[in-house]
Amino acid sequence: MTDSINRLAHKFSKLPGVGAKTAMRYAYAVINMSQSDVDEFCAALRDVKANVKYCSKCGNFTETDVCEICQKRQADVICVVTYPKDVVAMEKAHAFRGVYHVLHGTISPLEGRGADDIRVKELLARLDGVKEVILATNPDVEGEATAMYIAKLLKPLGVKVTRIAQGISMGSDIEYADEVTLSRALSARVEL
């Protein structure tokens, strides 16, 4: 194996979810690309690094000062998510018509992250005219702690605070669901 291939594979392996074997496959794929494809690939990397930034309102990825969602939608309902990738997931559902607020992390004392390390202050500054804040953090320990912290901050301010429902995924079998998921699914049930 050449040093160049190993160096490229090592760079690919630093990407999230890319193990050593996948990184090596990516390196081999680059070797088999035409020079123009490699140039376009490099240009796309430089372009995204140079042009993509955080929306000054919500913290989502954008190439302008204010993202398209914040520019076009009513801001009276804010959905709070952890990362920009969560905005993408929510948008795929085509079920939410409000705006987002991206925290860029969760409260995690074990990792030394507190409320001042995520975008909670920026959320508080956006509450003028807001009727509801939907907390859509992950249903793990850090996501729950973050949601509870934000809810405690917002409730005294007279803003309706809701949490996305949690339960059994569509297409899954009840017998494989854990006890916490089943308990939440039962408590969040709706009338038909």
Image: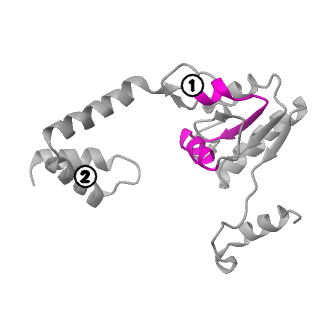
Q: Quadrant of residue 102?
A: top right
- Quarter that holds the C terminus: bottom right
Amino acid beneath label 1 = Cys
Point out the stretch of residues depicted in magenta. Answer: 67-93
What residue would you read off at disc 1? 55
Question: Magenta includes 54?
Answer: no
Q: Is residue 166 left or right of residue 3?
A: right
Kindly identify which residue carries mark 2: 26
Q: Nearer the viewer, residue 23 or 120?
A: 23
Residue lying at 34% horizontally and 27% vertically, measured from the top left: 47
Q: Is residue 11 above or below residue 54?
A: below
Q: Is residue 42 above or below residue 187?
A: above
Residue at the image position 59 percent from the left and 44 percent from the top = 86
Quick one: quadrant of the N terminus?
Answer: bottom left
- Callouts 2 and 1 close, C-beta under 8 Å: no
Q: Quadrant of residue 55?
A: top right
